[in-house]
């Protein structure tokens, strides 16, 4: 018995010495200061975060001493100052608790909740060389879960214009033994102060593949996805069979009431989902601004009844909604 107690004591001392070993402490500190990987898994097969670099886009830094304050409108743009520093945004991909829906920064991205109304997305900006330790603090303080939504904090919240294209999109199915792949690309970013179009030649594409573990139909009520593959690729390696429009072309708004929904072209299949290039100035709570469908829904909502008079001259509304963009890159 005595010898066993001595062994335990020796093991305890050895463990204590190892824990306080300055070389081990220095190693852990050094690792925590290493730059964050482009892809960080939070929960295997169910949740990961992408640090997506935004080449050509500046870094916004809080320029006041109080780091948390009520969020203000764009007119109060003095909260942030722009610096010529490499930047990135954080994209938090998470499967729902029932494994039926993939969320991106708390918005359903695959499948969509409403194919007529693409989700409005936003993301927090971080330095391109953010450390693992700084990222751990963000995660620990629930910033990635939007706990500070509606507050002005040290990390600028940017709104996103994006290209969403899905191979075997469940909205265009049904598909058997369903394995959809999302391709997600940034096209523009909006801050308090301005809206910018990104250089499409510099932006990379996030690829996310899901696989139904039940190997059934994409419209089955018991489908259950897992995230089986994640990659970040060059744009030229991402859009076989579909192609991609340059940002300065896809952002042009030529929608009018002559079209019911003003759907996009360049999808893998005709039909739903109707939109691929999601520019913020093209959509509101009624869908695609300028389309015949949008104008009917807006007037019905405004008047409380199906009042159609004046719809055909309402396309000027779309032009009034378009912000002034600058091109960066």
Image (spheres, helix red, strand yellow):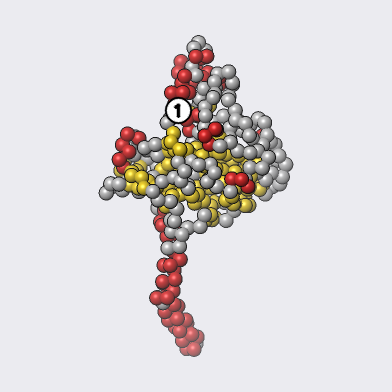
Would you place residue 292 above or below residue 204 in this image? Answer: above
Q: Nearer the viewer, residue 80 or 123?
A: 80
Percent of width and height locating residue 223: 65, 43
Q: Looking at the image, which residue is at 47% across and 19% down? A: 316
Residue 29: x and y, percent? 41, 67
Count of all numbered marks drawn on residues in the image: 1
User: Foreground residue, 215 or 36?
Assistant: 36
Residue 237 % position (x, y) = 63, 47
**The residue tagged with tag 1: helix, strand or loop?**
loop
| Residue farthest to the top, as pictured | 309
At a point 58% along the width and 18% down the height, the residue shown is: 258
| Residue at the outermost bottom position | 3
- Left or right, 296 with respect to 174, comes to left
Residue at position x 45%, y 41% in the image: 328
Residue at which label 1 appears: 322
When the figure is inspected, residue 223 is found, relative to residue 258, above or below; the finding is: below
Q: Position of residue 134 (x, y in %)?
A: 41, 57
> Which residue is painted at 51% across and 51% down in the image?
50
Is 130 or 199 nearer to us in this picture? 199
Residue 52 in view, yes or no: yes
Mark 1 nearby-residue class (10 Å; few <14, some 14–19, many ≥20): some
Residue extending furthest toward the right = 176
**The quarter of the displayed image where residue 30 is located:** bottom left
Residue 155 in view (yes/no): no
Instruction: From this view, report whether residue 139 is shown above or below residue 15.
Output: above
């Amino acid at each position: 018995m005595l010898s066993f107690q001595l062994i335990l004591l020796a093991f305890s001392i050895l463990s204590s010495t190892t824990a306080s070993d300055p070389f081990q402490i220095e190693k852990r500190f050094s690792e925590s200061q290493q730059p964050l990987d482009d892809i960080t898994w939070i929960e295997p097969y169910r949740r990961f975060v992408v640090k997506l670099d935004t080449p050509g886009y500046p870094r916004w830094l809080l320029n006041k001493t109080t780091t948390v304050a009520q969020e203000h409108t764009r007119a109060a743009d003095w909260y942030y100052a722009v610096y010529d520093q490499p930047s990135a945004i954080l994209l938090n991909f998470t499967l729902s608790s029932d494994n039926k829906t993939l969320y991106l920064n708390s918005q359903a991205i695959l499948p969509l909740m409403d194919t007529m109304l693409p989700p409005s997305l936003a993301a927090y900006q971080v330095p391109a060389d953010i450390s693992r330790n700084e990222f751990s603090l963000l995660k620990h303080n629930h910033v990635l879960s939007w706990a500070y939504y509606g507050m002005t904090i040290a990390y600028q919240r940017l709104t996103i214009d994006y290209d969403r294209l899905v191979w075997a999109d469940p909205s265009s199915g049904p598909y058997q033994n369903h394995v959809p792949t999302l391709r997600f690309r940034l096209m523009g970013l909006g801050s308090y102060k301005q809206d910018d179009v990104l250089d499409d030649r510099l932006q990379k594409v996030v690829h996310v593949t899901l696989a139904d573990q039940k190997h059934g139909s994409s419209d089955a009520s018991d489908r259950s996805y897992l995230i089986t593959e994640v990659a970040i690729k060059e744009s030229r390696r991402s859009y076989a069979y579909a192609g991609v429009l340059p940002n300065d072309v896809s952002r042009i708004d030529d929608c009018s009431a002559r079209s019911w929904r003003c759907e996009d072209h360049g999808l893998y299949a005709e039909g739903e989902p109707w939109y691929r290039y999601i520019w913020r100035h093209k959509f509101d709570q009624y869908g695609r601004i300028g389309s015949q469908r949008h104008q009917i829904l807006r007037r019905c909502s405004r008047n409380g009844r199906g009042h159609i008079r004046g719809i055909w001259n309402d396309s000027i509304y779309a032009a009034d909604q378009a912000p002034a963009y600058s091109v960066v890159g």
